[in-house]
Amino acid sequence: MRIEDMSIDQLLELNQYICQRIDELQEQETLQALSQLRVGLKVTFEGREGPVLGIVTKINRKSVIVLAEDGTKQYKVSPELLRPLRDVK
């Protein structure tokens, strides 16, 4: 069936299924990202003014609190945006 041939009711039902699937995929991404984080981990992410280095101070269900490396700012960040830093020795 072509989308042009669908009724409003059919389109609304299709939209509901699409939105539900998007939500499921986003939830999977969030859980995957959260599984790689822990309090005290050094991370980086792209802030409004460029790259930010910081330390994870709290992990919530859908967001992570990151304290900037210099201790001046605290950020509430989506876990998918964080990249763990590897210690260089």
Image (tube, rainbow, N blue to C red):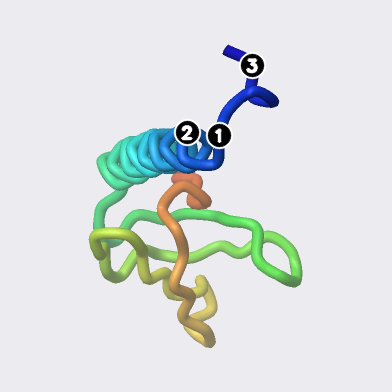
Q: Residues within 10 Å of mark 1 (few under 14, many from 20)?
A: few
Label 1 close to label 3 by CB (< 8 Å) = no
Q: Residue at x 42, y 69 (%)?
A: 66
Q: Quadrant of the N terminus?
A: top right
Location of mark 1 (residue)? 7
Q: Residue at x 26, y 63 (%)?
A: 59
Q: Amino acid at mark 1?
A: Ser
Label 2 close to label 1 by CB (< 8 Å) = yes
Q: Amino acid at mark 3?
A: Arg
Tell me: 35 left or right of 67.
left
Asked if residue 89 can be seen in this view, the reply is no
Q: Name the foreground residue: 89 vs 20.
A: 20
Label 3 – label 2 distance at C-alpha: 11 Å
Tell me: 73 left or right of 63.
right
Q: Residue at x 56, y 62 (%)?
A: 53
Q: Name the foreground residue: 85 vs 19.
A: 19
Q: Secondary structure at mark 1?
A: loop
- Earlier in the chain: of badge 3 and badge 2, it is 3
Residue 6 falls in image quadrant: top right
Q: Name the foreground residue: 27 vs 70.
A: 27
Q: Position of residue 81 (x, y in %)?
A: 52, 51
Location of mark 3 (residue)? 2
- Earlier in the chain: of badge 1 and badge 3, it is 3
Tell me: 49 left or right of 62.
right
**Furthest-right residue in this view:** 49
**Furthest-bottom residue in this view:** 72
Q: Residues within 10 Å of mark 2 (few under 14, many from 20)?
A: few
Location of mark 2 (residue)? 10
Asked if residue 7 can be seen in this view, the reply is yes
Query: Is 29 located above or below residue 3 in the figure?
Result: below
Q: Position of residue 10 (x, y in %)?
A: 47, 33
